[in-house]
Amino acid sequence: MNDRHGTAVRRAARALALCFALFSLFWLCACSSAGKTEAANDATLPAGIFPAGTDGLADDPRDVPATAAEPSAAPAPTEPTEPPVTAPAGPTEPPAWRDDPRSVTDLDAELPGFDYSPYLPVPQDVSRGSASLSYLYAHGGVTRAGSGGREIALTFSLAAESGYTGQLLDVLREKQVPATFLITLRDYLQSDPEERAETVRRIVREGHLVSSHGYTHIHSTLATNRRFLNELVLYRTELDALLRYHYPVSVFSDPYEEIYERDVYLCDLMGFRFLGYSFIPADDNGQAPVYMVLPQLKNALSPGAVIRMGISAENVKAVSDFIEYAQAQGYQFVLPVHAMD
């Protein structure tokens, strides 16, 4: 009986000792693990592992379980923005030649801002040679004055007027006779521009007609198509600036008394009436005396005659006498081209 009781006690003691041993082992393991963790937290990592400005290693993407990508959030709606307000562009400056045609130094170059497309190129069937009267009339040209009655026209070239234009204007005003004045405008204004500009204004103011005799005194055969156009454009521009208003009629007469198809064609496109003459006296550039000039004028007197003369002291006297003679024959002096034509 006592042996059984002793055996039970010994078994219980061994079990208790085993439990105590296991508990001690677990406690020792727990303490060891805590010490290792604390040591790891106090460890200093070698320099250069982390990029500058970071606190630690980034998560390794391989450690992140694969999950379906979440749709990115839609951006928050923003208030509509007004389009930027830009100041309206100011008026562009006109090309310099519109304010000062004489600023153009190369008359063969393109004028900035002028559209050449309606005029150039000139068709191949337009000749550079002489134009027939039928071609001239078909393009608005004029070589006769009036409507076929006893009417004649006087034209005067200002190419070499030698200071006698004022005297001629006095005679015309006294006799109430209109005339056409042919002006090579750029060349004419080179000498004493203010006085000569006032002469042009007086011509227009007293009811006479101003006609282009070329902007410069260049022979038509030497002028390219563009140069010829530029001569017309610059003449019109400078005349308007000189008169301070738009002159309502444009007339052109060749400075060398020629009539070429190309010139007639471009004049027509530009709105110029090409003016030809029926008679030019041999006045030796205005130096011939009255007794030589006056008989020529009387012989040229015929219905519709367009007479062209230079301006000189002798010619002024001859014209005064011729006007009286023609009026005595029943002739009336008219302008070959009018603004209303």
Image (cartoon, helix red, strand yellow):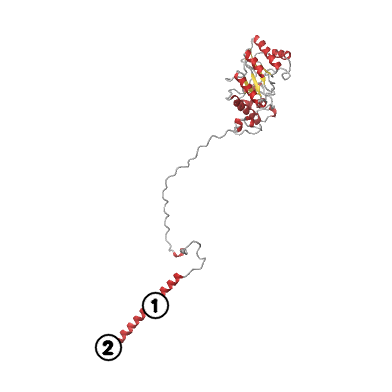
Label 2 sits on a secondary structure element that is: helix
Which residue appears farthest toward the left when viewing the image?
1
Give amino acid for label 2. His
Which residue appears farthest toward the bottom when viewing the image?
2
Residue 314 x, y percent position in the rendering: 71, 16
The one of 113 and 124 positioned closer to us in this rendering? 113
Quarter location, residue 294: top right
Label 1 sits on a secondary structure element that is: helix
> Which residue corresponds to the image point at 69% horizontal and 14% vertical from the top-left?
317
* Label 2 Cα neighbours within 10 Å, binned few <14 / some 14-19 / many ≥20: few
The C terminus - image quarter: top right
- Is 67 on the left-hand or right-hand side of 117? left
Measured along the vertical axis of the image, is residue 292 above or below residue 20?
above
Discs 2, 1 touching: Cβ within 8 Å: no
Residue 227 visible, this angle: yes
Per the rendering, the mark at residue 131 is none
Residue 93 x, y percent position in the rendering: 57, 34
The N terminus - image quarter: bottom left
Measured along the vertical axis of the image, is residue 41 above or below residue 327?
below
- Is 46 on the left-hand or right-hand side of 304? left
Residue 122 visible, this angle: no
Q: How far apart are the alpha carbons under marks 2 and 1?
A: 35 Å
> Which residue corresponds to the image point at 66% horizontal and 11% vertical from the top-left?
324
Quarter location, residue 21: bottom left
Residue 91 x, y percent position in the rendering: 54, 34
Circle 1 is placed at which residue position? 28
The one of 256 and 32 positioned closer to us in this rendering? 32
Disc 2 vs disc 1: which is toward the camera?
1
Circle 2 is placed at which residue position? 5
* Label 1 Cα neighbours within 10 Å, binned few <14 / some 14-19 / many ≥20: few
Give amino acid for label 1. Leu
